[in-house]
Image (spheres, rainbow, N blue to C red):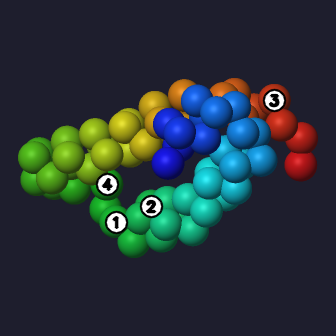
Amino acid sequence: VLHRVTRERDVAAVLDYVRSLAEPINRFVDNTMVMAEDEKTRYARLSLMHATSLQLLSAGDFTKLEG
């Protein structure tokens, strides 16, 4: 979804999609021990967070937004 709305330069759709991710991302961070003792688990969780970050960054520089 993010690739499509970004490619189409539909800013409103990008922002709506990113907003829709806030709750699941917060839930993951709040309820998941990312830095798990098990190295494979820790790596998988960090990789998931990194991939999510790259996806969001590909949509734009959200630090430039106000509010």
* Residue shown at 19% from the left, 42% from the top: 43
Question: Looking at the picture, which amino acid does disc 3 mark?
Answer: Lys
Q: Which element type, helix, strand or loop, lies under badge 4?
A: loop
Q: CA distance from mark 4 to mark 2?
A: 7 Å
- Judge whether 9 appears above or below 52 on screen: above
Q: Quadrant of residue 6?
A: top right
Question: Looking at the picture, which amino acid does disc 4 mark?
Answer: Val
Q: Is residue 11 left or right of residue 6?
A: right
The first of marks 4 and 3 along the sequence is: 4
Tag 1–tag 4 contact (CB < 8 Å): yes
The first of marks 1 and 3 along the sequence is: 1
* Residue shown at 39% from the left, 71% from the top: 31
Question: Looking at the picture, which amino acid does disc 1 mark?
Answer: Thr
Between 12 and 63, the one lying in front of the other is 12
Whether residue 22 is visible to the viewer of this picture, yes or no, is: no
In the rendered image, residue 27, in percent from the top left (x then y), is placed at 48, 70
Q: Which element type, helix, strand or loop, lies under badge 2?
A: helix
Residue where numbered disc 1 is placed: 32
Tag 2–tag 1 contact (CB < 8 Å): yes
The mark lying in front, picked from 1 and 3, is: 3
* Residue shown at 20% from the left, 46% from the top: 44
* Residue shown at 38% from the left, 37% from the top: 50
Tag 4–tag 2 contact (CB < 8 Å): yes
Question: Looking at the picture, which amino acid does disc 2 mark?
Answer: Val
Task: Count the marks.
Answer: 4
Residue where numbered disc 2 is placed: 29
